[in-house]
Image (tube, helix red, strand yellow):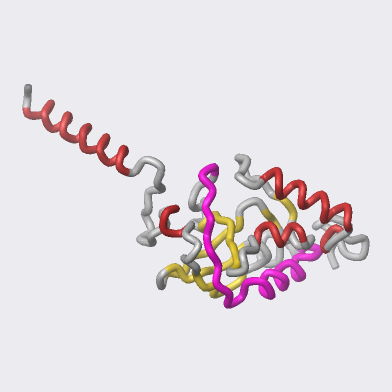
């Protein structure tokens, strides 16, 4: 066996060993420990340091500022420079501030989604200390609507069902007195 063939064989074996040892885990290129085993524990909570809008916030993960985009929801825009403030956007942002600012949250990732999006934000479900999921609560209260980006996610059916209840009940952005479900209406 030639020297070059031996090197190729050793490299291939090394890659296979690494692939097997990391099977089921996300490659972490950002220096923060984000493995499911460490962040889905009931006792692992992180402080919300900033609310950007109704579906995006910052948390402190062991001294690292992480921007989190909530999976499965979208709220009317308030900070996107490409669009004007949409109907009920300010209310959605304020509701998220009321619910999450300065609070401790637990992270749940979804195996059907990437850990990060194209903007390097964590993609997650966030739970308050009392067990309430922020994603679910925002939809149920009418401050967000169900949003699927490319692939179905773990709670898609549940979020759609909750949205239907919020819509038929006229909650939040579904109210006739606000947007009647149309985020394009300006106020």
| Residue 8 in the figure: left or right of residue 100 | left
**In front here: 61 or 76?**
61
Identify the residue at image location x=66%, y=67%: 53
Q: Residue furthest right?
A: 176
* Image vertical order of residue 158 relative to residue 59, above or below: above
Q: Count the marks: how many? A: 0
Q: Position of residue 133 (x, y in %)?
A: 64, 60
| Residue 1 in the figure: left or right of residue 118 | left
| Residue 169 in the figure: left or right of residue 70 | right
* Image vertical order of residue 110 relative to residue 41, above or below: above
* Image vertical order of residue 107 relative to residue 117, above or below: below
Q: Confirm whether the magenta stretch covers residue 101.
A: yes
**In front here: 6 or 125?**
125
Q: Position of residue 172 (x, y in %)?
A: 83, 63
**Where does the magenta region start and end?**
86-112
Quarter of the image holding residue 2?
top left
Q: Quadrant of the C terminus?
A: bottom right
Q: Confirm whether the magenta stretch covers residue 43.
A: no
Q: Position of residue 138 (x, y in %)?
A: 72, 61
Identify the residue at image location x=35%, y=61%: 31
| Residue 18 in the figure: left or right of residue 89 | left
Identify the residue at image location x=67%, y=72%: 99
Quarter of the image holding residue 174?
bottom right
């Amino acid at each position: 066996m030639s020297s070059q063939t031996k090197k190729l064989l050793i490299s291939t074996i090394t890659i296979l060993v690494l692939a097997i040892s990391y099977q089921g885990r996300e490659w972490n290129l950002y220096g923060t420990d984000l493995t499911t085993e460490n962040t889905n524990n009931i006792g692992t909570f992180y402080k919300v340091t900033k609310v950007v809008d109704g579906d995006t916030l910052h948390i402190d993960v062991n001294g690292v500022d992480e921007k989190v985009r909530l999976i499965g929801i979208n709220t009317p825009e308030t900070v996107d420079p490409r669009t004007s403030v949409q109907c009920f956007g300010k209310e959605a942002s304020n509701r998220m501030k009321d619910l999450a600012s300065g609070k401790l949250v637990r992270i749940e990732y979804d195996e059907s989604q990437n850990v990060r999006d194209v903007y390097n934000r964590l993609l997650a479900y966030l739970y308050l200390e009392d067990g309430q999921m922020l994603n679910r609560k925002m939809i149920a209260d009418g401050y967000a609507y169900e949003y699927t980006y490319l692939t179905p996610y773990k709670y898609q059916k549940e979020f759609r069902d909750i949205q239907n209840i919020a819509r038929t009940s006229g909650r939040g952005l579904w109210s006739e007195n606000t947007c009647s479900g149309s985020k394009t209406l300006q106020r």
